[in-house]
Amino acid sequence: MGLLHQRHVIVAISGGIAAYKGAELVRLLKKQGAVVRVILSRGAKEFITPLTLQALSGEPTHSELLDETAEAGMGHIELARWADLVLIAPATANFVATLNQGSANDLMSSICLATTAPVMIAPAMNQAMWSNSASQQNIESLKQREVIILEPDNGIQACGDVGPGRLPQPETIVRQVASVFKTGEMTGKKVVITAGPTREAIDPVQYISNHSSGKMGYAIADAMIDAGADVTLISGPVSLKQPDRCTLVSVTSAHEMLEAATEAAKGTDIFISAAAVADYYIPKSSDQKIKKKSDKMTLNLAKTPDIVSIVKENNPKLFVLGFAAETQNVEQYAREKLASKNLDAIIANDVSREDIGFNSDDNEALWVEQESTHHFSKCNKAQLARDLVALLATKLEL
């Protein structure tokens, strides 16, 4: 199941240049399991066709206020009752003003007045129009009426201006839509998550590391945030955007991660060790770059600290979930780590598979406890993270 499984979402597209992004927005909402119905203003039809959106949504598009095919000819009432969320993206300056005035002169504005579902708008307009005091007063008034406002992005606009007013990327909008329906399973819980690789310096230029992308750990952080948790994310070097609404602690080496994890674990409720910590480091790394003078080089390595074991030893009542990235005998090795590290549970996956390996967007995993296992079927890492959080909430009886 996706993040929006069977949620009824109306996507209303007003007549701005950013209307073309509506196609990708609908596609992504559908991908996350939403049932999507699209409303197009007359202006929007100049930028994107109803047929395109009908093909992507699998539902007829709507434009007219009085729909003779709907019950009693009142299509706006039928749609307003059907919706779990009404999303206007893009919302032009004109529509923002219309919504604030409480007008009901077309299908979009009428649904916004008639629905009891949350209304979310993603304003998109020229930077000068966005900054205008009239627009800002409209936005503030709508906020007071509990309309959800997605702040526009900054950047180069179609007219050549630079500034705030760009429609947020469809992925960002979908995430904000999903947050409206967050479960709250982890509300009030403090959660620490480690993610990504560590880098162990050989010299100022070279280091020992691994192929971890950090995607799984970051996906778990997102899922925990959406579930209402207070999240601290301790991250090794990755090329990922920081999740919204969390505390990020950036580290490089295993020893830095240990120090951060030891401190963050104090007073927390759940510790999730999703980082791929290097197994060895060089105790005496070179202060200068090592020159390539011979065919061979010998490095004296020492074991890195076992972060998850140390955290559990220091906090015996803390629920600690480990990760095991294996290439063979996945469950067997996971159970050995579960016992040797005294963990409450461990997630194991086969990183030798290219379709679910370190840099893949998908994953398939086993939840392993002392007396049971749970199989997570192959899916995208965001969905697996959601499923993991739901299972964890069940295990902890939250």
Image: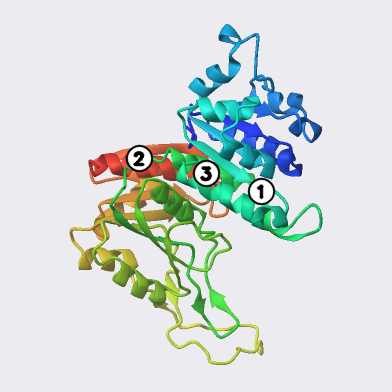
Q: Residue furthest left?
A: 317
Do residues under tags 2 and 3 come within 8 Å of each other at their CB atoms? no
Residue 42 to residue 225: above or below: above
In this figure, which residue is indicated by the disc labeled 3?
142
Callout 2 environment at 10 Å: few (<14), some (14 to 19), or many (20+)? some
In this figure, which residue is indicated by the disc labeled 1?
167
Disc 2 to disc 1, C-alpha distance: 32 Å
Element type at marker 1?
loop
Residue 379 to residue 33: above or below: below
Mark number displayed over residue 390 = 2
**Residue 104: image location, x then y, percent:** 60, 27
Query: Nearer the viewer's eye, disc 2 or disc 1?
Result: 1
**Residue 344: image location, x then y, percent:** 25, 52
Mark 2 or 3 closer to N-term?
3
Q: Nearer the viewer, residue 310 or 46?
A: 46
Q: Nearer the viewer, residue 52 or 317?
A: 52
**Residue 384: image location, x then y, percent:** 45, 42
Name the kind of residue labelled 3 in the image.
Leu
Mark 3 or 1 closer to N-term?
3
Q: Residue at x 37, y 45 (%)?
A: 227
**Residue 116: image location, x then y, percent:** 45, 28
